[in-house]
Structure formats: C-alpha cells, structure tokens
Image: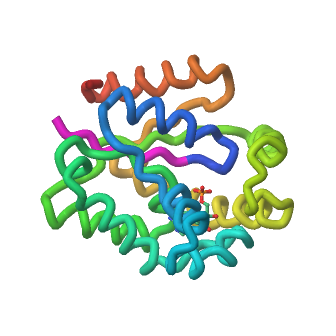
Amino acid sequence: MTTRLLIVGPQGSGKGTQGVRVAEAFGVPVVSTGDIFRANIKGGTELGLKVKAITDAGNLVPDDVTGDIVRDRLSQDDATTAGFLLDGYPRNAAQVAYLDGFLAESAAALHAVILLDVPREESLARITERAKVEGRSDDTEEAVAKRLDIYESETAPIIETYEDRGILDRIDGVGSLDDITARIFAALDARGLKRA
Ligand code: AMP
C-alpha cells in the first residue's frame, strides 16, 4: 500500500508536528523541504550556502532548486515503495505543476491534502512562542511577516486547486494536539486510506 500525502497550512499551524504523527501512523517518511534546507545550512553544504540568505529573509528558494531536491528525495526507495508525507512543498502554482509532472512519470498522484486551518492571530502567537524556544534564524519579525504574506498570496491559491480535484481535507487546527491528530485520522479514514 502506497500513501502519498501533503500537509499544508500557514507557519505556526502545527503542520510540522501533525505531519510527523500522520507519517508515522501511515509508515511513510516526512519530506519537509524546510528541514532539508535547514540541515544543509547547518552542515555548511554548497546548497546550504546558496539558500541561507534567502531562507533567513523568509523568501522562497527558487523553484528549480527546490524541485530538484524534492525529485531526488521522492525518487528514493522508501518514498517510491511506502509513499510520503510532503510538508512545505508545493508552495505555489509552479511547484504544483512540477510535482504533478513528476508523479505522472510513474502514473502516481497524491491521495489526500490535509489543510490545517488556523486563524492568523493564533498562528502568529504560536510562532512568537516557537521563536523563544527554538531560536530559528528565520523567525525574526520581518521574516515571519514575509512568510505569512507569501503564504497568503502564493500558497493559499493552491488549496483551491486541490479542492477542485476533490482531495482536500480541511481540518480545524485549533485544539489539543491529540484532538487535531484525531480529526486528521478521521478525514483520511473516510477516504479509505489505511494506516500501517
Ligand atoms: P518551512 O520550514 O517550511 O517554513 O521552510 C523554511 C524556509 O525554507 C522557507 O521560508 C523558504 O525560504 C524555504 N522553503 C521551504 N520550502 C520551500 C518551497 N517549497 N519553495 C521555496 N522555498 C522553500
């Protein structure tokens, strides 16, 4: 059984945390472009050096760079066999088209897209809290505002694309972590997707 999932939501929606739980339950790897960039920055790789200033400012890394990374990761055995949970990609219409093209090469498609709905004030409050705890270099006030703007202008429109395809599950992202996970599981169960 192969399960291909995507989790979408504004920064501070809790998609990282929920994504890990869902991926574990389905026995698939989380593929987070943000995590891949952060690991490369930390490791001082060529890619890391290339993207550090961009991510620190809260801007999007160019689509061709990001697309190559996703293609490489999704081509690995675990992802082709079990599937994957994408977190943070695609983030705009061009990335949706690229992912569609890549998946079509192996006659594959996404099974479900989980949208974590969280009001702007709530996500801002959560990021402010995260900034204190994690000290991410891109959690400055300017970078956070930039990322929220990009989410609203470029990422929110892709939600409609997936809604039109009938694969979008809109989940209320306010509540306890366990309640939110249960809501996600209920939506995926209703699609007949089987947990591992
Ligand atoms: P995230 O952890 O998902 O918030 O990603 C952190 C940063 O990595 C973003 O602010 C972007 O600079 C970069 N990034 C992550 N995913 C993408 C993507 N799909 N396209 C472009 N840039 C990305």
Give coordinates of residue 36: x percent, y percent. Answer: 49, 60
State left or right for residue 170 relative to residue 152.
left
Is 3 covered by the magenta stretch? yes
**The quarter of the picture showing ligand 1:** bottom right
Q: Which sits in the foreground, 160 or 89?
A: 89
Give coordinates of residue 135: x percent, y percent. Answer: 78, 51
State left or right for residue 121 relative to residue 1.
right
- Please determine whether, in this image, residue 11 is positioned above or below residue 25: below
**Can the viewer see residue 158 in this picture?**
no
- Please determine whether, in this image, residue 46 is positioned above or below residue 137: below
**Which residue is found at the position 64% from the left and 74% from the top?**
52
Give coordinates of residue 39: x percent, y percent. Answer: 54, 60
**Can the viewer see residue 37 in this picture?**
yes
**Quadrant where the image shows the C terminus:** top left
The residue at the far front in this view is 43
**Which residue is found at the position 53% from the left and 33% from the top?**
18
Is 68 covered by the magenta stretch? no
Q: From which residue to which does the magenta span run?
A: 1-8
